[in-house]
Image (spheres, helix red, strand yellow):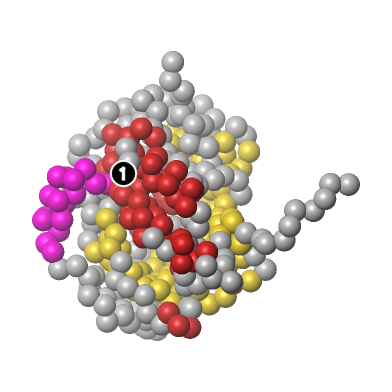
Amino acid sequence: MSKRVTLFDPPALDSSKAPIENVLELTPVVDIGPDVFTNTRPLWHPPGARGIYGGAAIAQSLAAAMRTVPADFAVHSMHCYFVLAGDSEIPILYHVERVRDGRSFITRTVQARQQGRPIFTTTLSFGRANSGGKKTIEHASSIPPISVPEEPLEDIIKKIEETGGGPFQSAKAGIVNLESRTTQTQAMGTLSRQDFRSGGQQAHLSALAYITDSFFIGTVARVHNIPRFSSSAELKMVLKALKNPSDLDDEDIARSLSELKEEETADLRRRLEGALSKINDERSKKDHKEIGMMVSLDHSIYFHNPWAFRADEWMLTEMESPWAGEGRGLVLQKIWAKDGTLIATCTQEGVVRLKQDEPARAKI
């Protein structure tokens, strides 16, 4: 008998929705309360991670909060804390609290719980459209002079379908200013197999929230050129597990979740294979550094133009790490639409600890 990883049996996939919409779908739990929701489908646990992919909790909490506000209000800020690692084999309950309903701003808090324990919490603020008046102060950071892929969206979608990829695709645009160890830029995009027809702009906002956690805190290690996995044995073990990603799922995992996971694991495989070739060289260095622990602590998103982008078009994201110390690291992220519109600014702090060289202490 397979484990129940959702509170209710998942319905059939809705072909009118993009795959990521199916993955992030929520179900109301009216028996508990009017503003309580649960994940409709299983959530992915990335190989080597402590829990579920954090972007899923961010996106589903946003989706739950958006269900409690009028359509003419859009989220402009979201402040999150990862409390405990989420278990992919236990349903999540998202409890929304209606903190304040004003004429221009609305405030909500969402707490994600598993077995009664909070694993994730966030506070969100929503603003009414066009509430700033006719005269406004406007400025925005310019998009870096980096080209995003020119391949037509239809051709890319066809290629993803042929190769069995997931509902979004990313492509790196290179590292700049590496010597100062502060900035890395890469192009990322979400490509849907269907247009976001059913969820409107809320679906695009959820998709954007989902991808903001991808590659984020890892920037701290990358700007120091430290591979995420620095042991040959560890790398080979993970690579072996990734040879057949579908084997990592329980038999009842939905197809859409499998597709999402395959895209993530394919990228992880590419990065691990590149890191594996550097192991011997790295170990020969006197000041050898290895990541011992890297997990996110908090995550903030400022949505600048919630109605001015589509998540099924290419976006460019620039990640910068201005500080690391005390076993933590801070990363800033800016995201632009393909036309150069700055659509979001994000921050994330996480635990970034190195493996220590001190010999084990004698037991007393």
Rendered location of residue 196, percent (x, y): 23, 49
| Residue type pointed to by label 1 | Glu
Going by the image, does 294 lie left or right of 153? right
Residue 45 among magenta residues: no
In the image, the segment drawn in magenta is 151-166
Residue 153 colored in magenta in the image: yes
Most foreground residue, 171 or 237:
237
The residue closer to the viewer here, 230 or 186, is 230
Left or right, 55 with reference to 22? right
Q: Is residue 285 above or below residue 81?
A: below
Q: Count numbered badges in the picture.
A: 1
Query: Is residue 61 something one can see in this rendering?
Result: no
Whole-percent x, y for residue 23 in the image:
34, 41
What residue do we see at 22% from left, 75% from top? 147
Q: Residue furthest right?
A: 364
Q: Is residue 189 visible?
A: yes
Q: Nearer the viewer, residue 294 or 206?
A: 294
Measuring 22% from the left and 61% from the top, which residue is drawn there?
313
Residue at 39% across, 40% down: 241
Label 1 sits on residue:
262
Q: State the residue lying farthest toward the top.
A: 1
Asked if residue 113 is positioned above or below residue 167 in the image, the reply reads: above
Give residue 240's position: percent from left, percent from top: 38, 41
Residue 21 in percent (x, y) is at: 30, 44
Judging depth in this view, the residue of 35 and 167 nearest the camera is: 167
| Label 1 element class | helix
Q: Is residue 128 above or below residue 196?
A: below
- Residue at (33, 55) in percent of width and height: 270
Instruction: State which quarter of the image contains the N terminus.
Output: top left
Q: Main secondary structure of the magenta part?
A: helix
